[in-house]
Amino acid sequence: MTAFLIRRLLAMVPVLALVLVIVFSLVRLIPGDPAVTLLGPGATQQQISALRLQLDLDKSLPLQFVSYLGGLAQGDLGQSLKSGLPVARELLSRLPATLELAFVALIGAILVGIPLGVVSATRPNSALDHALRVGSLVGVSVPAFLLALILQLVFSVWLGWLPVSGRASPFATGAGATGFALLDSLLAGNPRAFLDGLAHVILPATVLAAFLAATLGRFVRNALMETLGEDFIRTARAKGLTRAEVVYGHGLRNALLPAITVVGLKFAEMLGGAVLTETIFAWPGIGRYMFEAIRNRDYPVIQGTTLLFALIFVASSIVVDILHALLDPRIRRKVAS
């Protein structure tokens, strides 16, 4: 397993190298002088020179790239052009909010998508199966921004059940030990703050989970139907096993392997999709931070967030491969050989 992990890490080196080149080129590919473009036509020569010095634009491209890599090796992603604060510190302060939102959405998608896929697979071509398939198609097709606006209108404006935006009410604000609002409220023994944080996270997590739940349900349905037609399933039935033992003990266990790939890769995509969701719900995470940076043309922040999302995607891919090797004996034997 160690050798397999080393091979997977080495295979990701070219990917990360390409990502670094793309991130480095974001500012340098701007037509004309990037400093003038960033500051606008009203900037003075002194301001332009200061920004060129800050972004190392006064050096040649190879030296700029070496300087960029040197900063990354020290954890330096530059400073925000708007706030003047280090980008790395800003990302670390916002990362827990994005991860919390993504994990809640992931749990919700798994709890909804897998049971729906199992129900559809065990009752093929029934009215319930057709209804669930239509529902999954709607979940895949509806744009995230439209679903977000509909949920806000129904549950916040019309019914008044849930907050329309934000991460917490004023009474529940305050930095915790971990930065995860729900976890910190539990550690502090504050059920009121926990319920408040849960109420705030439900709508944005639902928007993020909708696409994954629909996709996961379709994958589980197709994989389980294919698995239930295998010879070992007929053997299990011939042994007198109950329907539940056949479906859940043998069929679902094998059908979940492709679902793991979907969950792992879609989780990384979910973080990228959080840019729009966090902006609509005013969620103080990395996605909203990136959106504000794009609007303000804050390129050090755009570079830092892009690199972070790429690293998360690569890490998710490696975790999926490891889980496959752990859960599938065939892959485990191949890895060990």
Image (spheres, grey):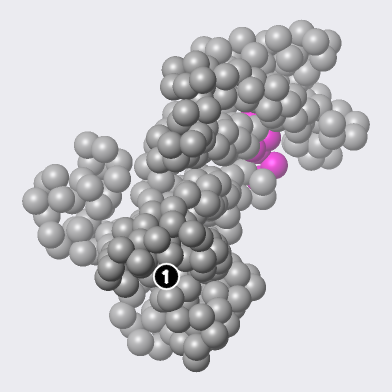
271 and 236: which one is in front? 236
Q: Secondary structure at mark 1?
A: helix
Relative to residue 292, is residue 263 drawn left or right? left
Q: Name, please, the residue furthest toward the left.
A: 189
107 and 306: which one is in front? 107
Query: Disc 1 residue type?
Result: Val
301 and 19: which one is in front? 19
Q: Name, please, the residue furthest toward the front.
A: 238
Q: Which residue is at 20% across, 58% downward?
A: 194
Quadrant (top left/top right/bottom left/bottom right) for the N terminus: top left
Whether residue 293 is visible, yes or no, is yes
Relative to residue 142, is residue 322 drawn left or right? left
Q: Position of residue 114 (x, y in %)?
A: 41, 65
What is the crowding at mark 1: few (fewer than 14 residues within 10 Å), some, or many (at least 20)?
A: many
Q: Position of residue 181 (x, y in %)?
A: 27, 50
Relative to residue 53, is residue 36 drawn left or right? right
Please give the range of residues in magenta.
296-302
Q: Which residue is at 28% across, 66% downward?
A: 241
Q: Which residue is at 75% across, 30% downward?
A: 22
208 inside magenta stretch: no
Q: Position of residue 150 (x, y in %)?
A: 52, 80
Relative to residue 64, is residue 311 drawn left or right? left
* Circle 1 residue: 118
In the picture shown, does residue 167 fall above or below 290?
below
Whether residue 289 is visible, yes or no, is no
Q: Which residue is at 44% across, 53% downward?
A: 254
**In terms of secondary structure, what is the magenta stretch mainly?**
helix
184 and 297: which one is in front? 184
Query: How many labels, in total?
Result: 1
297 inside magenta stretch: yes
